[in-house]
Image: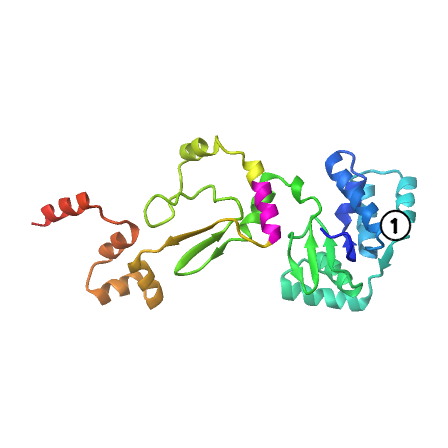
Amino acid sequence: MRINVRSLIDTNVLVYADASDDPTKQRIALNCIKEYRLQGQAVLSTQVLQEFVNVALRKLRLPMRQIKERLAFYQRFEVVNTSPEMIVGALDLCVLHSLSFYDALIVQAAMVSGCQQILSEDMKHGARFGVVQIVNPFIDTLSFTQLWYHISTAILITTDQLTYKLGAYSSSSIDYRKGDYFMPLTEKELKSRDSKRDLSTELLAAVRQMKTGRPAKVHQVEIPLVVSARMKSGLTQSAFAELLGVSVRTITRMGTRKKTTKRRSKDSHCDC
């Protein structure tokens, strides 16, 4: 999060600034508003102010006087007025980036006002829309599920080689030691393995690593040659088996495990 660049502050930051039930996020929100205001880099939009008033009335249940005091303070910020042209631009962003209309309108306001950042918890951290980047100021306070969502978006899978960019964290349901394919661990195995780990620390370290743009670990797992060949050929399993003159069952066995010396000896004895 860069304080020295123009940034549009989303509604959730204003809401957390008045949400006393979450002291940690309230402190972060207040610091954001203060620092960006002092730097002259804080931008709001009429949409943000309208949404804040709605939440303040319905959920925070703030007194009317307090809401008006907040609005009087936020009027000192640079405020982008929602125009018909901005609404049309937001509709285009909806189509191009599969955004909801209201998220698209926030992004459009940032673009129109020359912002480089949008401070928001509601949109995906790190996402870019032209020169505008989404920055979640509350990233270190996310729950386990939210952290895993951000990490899983960095997974890259190719056809011939599976490459997992997981920062400092490895997938919790994959065991790379069991044969050619990813084999899911049982619930008992997962509990046994994870009981010795500090997942919260690992996930926070992974998010920080992802923010640098450099993967901390790259796991490469080879796909069996028969599977790779069939995938490249574009044939179905049955068509590929017919081409080789073998049964589908043989193709399946070749692709799911490697026969050990002991297994080959037993099979050879049975074939005699």
Q: Residue visible at 69% across and 52% down?
A: 135
In this view, 21 is above or below 78: above
Which residues are drawn in magenta? 203-212
Comparing 94 with 170, the one in front is: 170
Q: What colouring style does the render use?
A: rainbow
Q: Position of residue 236 (x, y in %)?
A: 32, 63
Q: Residue visible at 28% across and 49% down?
A: 257
Count of all numbered marks drawn on residues in the image? 1
Q: Amino acid at mark 1?
A: Tyr
Inspect this view and state whether residue 145 appears: no
Q: Residue visible at 14% across and 46% down?
A: 265
Comparing 185 with 222, the one in front is: 222
Q: Residue visible at 41% across and 61% down?
A: 159
Q: Position of residue 96 (x, y in %)?
A: 64, 66
Q: Residues within 10 Å of mark 1 (few under 14, many from 20)?
A: some
Instruction: Locate residue 144 relative to residue 257 in the image: left or right.
Output: right
Q: Is residue 237 magenta?
A: no
Inspect this view and state whether residue 68 appears: yes
Instruction: Locate residue 248 relative to residue 186 in the image: left or right.
Output: left
Q: Which residue matches tag 1?
A: 74
The majority secondary structure of the magenta stretch comes to: helix
Asked where in the image residue 7 lies, by quadrant, the reply is bottom right
Q: Position of residue 252 (x, y in %)?
A: 27, 54
